[in-house]
Image (spheres, rainbow, N blue to C red):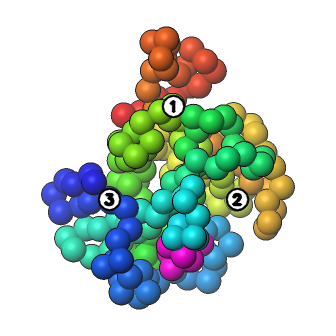
C-alpha cells in the first residue's frame, strides 16, 4: 500500500464494495474504461488481474487494474511487462489531480506487486486526448505502436520501471522514459 497525507492506493478488499457500487462514471467515458464494479468482478474471476483502489481522506476516488497476461494480446510487450488497465477517477472527484497523483505512484505499486517487471504498459483510445496528455505528462512514452481495439484505434504507451538484471537502464534497451 502507498500512503501519503491521507492519499493511498492498495489492492481491492471486500470492505471496498459499497464504495465501488456507488462509484460514478459518466456514460461518455464508458468507451474509454470499465466500471470499477466490473474491474473487481473480472479480477475476482481472473488470477492474472488485480484490482486496486485509490482513496483520499477515506473516500474512494479511483480504481484500476494491473495484470501480467499470459500472451495473446496485441499490446503485450514481453513477460516482464505489467498491463495497467481500466483506470478511472470517480466523476465527483475528477479535475482534482487524483489521476496524475495515481500515475506518479504507479511505478511504486508495480514494483511492489510485480517485482520482476521492468515496464508498465497501457492502451489508450486515440480520441481520448485528455488521457493521452495525462499519460505523457506522467512519463509514459508513445512508440507509435497501434492496434484495432473494440471501439477503434488504440495507442500503446510504455513506462520503464528500473534497471534490468545486467544493470542496464531501460533506456539502453529502447525505452526513453524512466520514472520512480
Q: Identify which residue is drawn at 62% across, 36% down.
A: 79
Percent of width and height locating residue 126: 72, 56
**Residue 71 included in the magenta stretch of the image:** no
Q: Which residues are magenta?
A: 34-41
Callout 2 environment at 10 Å: few (<14), some (14 to 19), or many (20+)?
many
Secondary structure of the residue carrying numbered label 1: loop
- Residue 9 badge: 3
Q: Is residue 92 visible?
A: no
Element under disc 2: strand
Residue 127 against residue 117 in the figure, above or below: below
Q: Neighbour class for label 1 at 10 Å: few (<14), some, many (≥20)?
A: many
Separation of marks 3 and 1 at Cα, in angstroms: 20 Å
Label 3 or label 2, whichever lies nearer to me, is 3
Which residue is labeled 1 in the image? 118
Q: Give the number of the disc on residue 125.
A: 2
Who is closer to the viewer here, 142 or 85? 85
Residue drawn where x is 79% and y is 67% of the image? 151
State whether residue 50 appears in this view. Answer: yes
Instruction: Specify which label sits upstream in the sequence, 3 or 1.
Output: 3
Dividing the picture into quarters, in which one does residue 114 lie? top left
Magenta segment's dominant SS is helix
Amino acid at each position: 500500500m502507498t500512503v501519503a497525507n491521507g492519499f493511498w492506493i492498495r489492492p481491492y478488499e471486500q470492505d471496498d464494495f459499497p464504495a465501488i457500487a456507488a462509484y460514478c462514471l459518466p456514460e461518455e467515458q464508458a468507451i474509454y474504461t470499465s466500471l470499477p464494479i466490473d474491474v473487481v468482478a473480472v479480477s475476482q474471476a481472473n488470477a492474472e488481474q488485480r484490482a486496486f483502489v485509490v482513496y483520499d481522506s477515506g473516500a474512494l476516488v479511483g480504481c484500476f487494474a494491473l495484470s501480467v497476461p499470459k500472451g495473446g494480446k496485441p499490446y503485450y510487450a514481453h513477460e516482464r511487462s505489467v498491463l495497467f488497465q481500466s483506470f478511472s477517477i470517480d466523476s465527483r472527484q475528477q479535475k482534482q489531480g487524483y489521476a496524475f497523483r495515481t500515475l506518479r505512484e504507479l511505478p511504486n505499486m508495480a514494483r511492489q506487486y510485480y517485482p520482476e517487471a521492468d515496464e508498465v504498459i497501457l492502451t489508450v483510445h486515440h480520441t481520448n486526448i485528455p488521457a493521452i496528455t495525462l499519460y505523457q505528462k506522467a512519463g509514459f512514452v508513445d512508440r507509435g505502436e497501434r492496434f484495432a481495439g473494440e471501439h477503434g484505434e488504440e495507442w500503446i504507451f510504455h513506462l520503464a520501471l528500473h534497471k534490468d538484471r545486467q544493470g542496464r537502464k531501460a533506456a539502453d534497451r529502447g525505452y526513453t522514459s524512466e520514472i520512480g
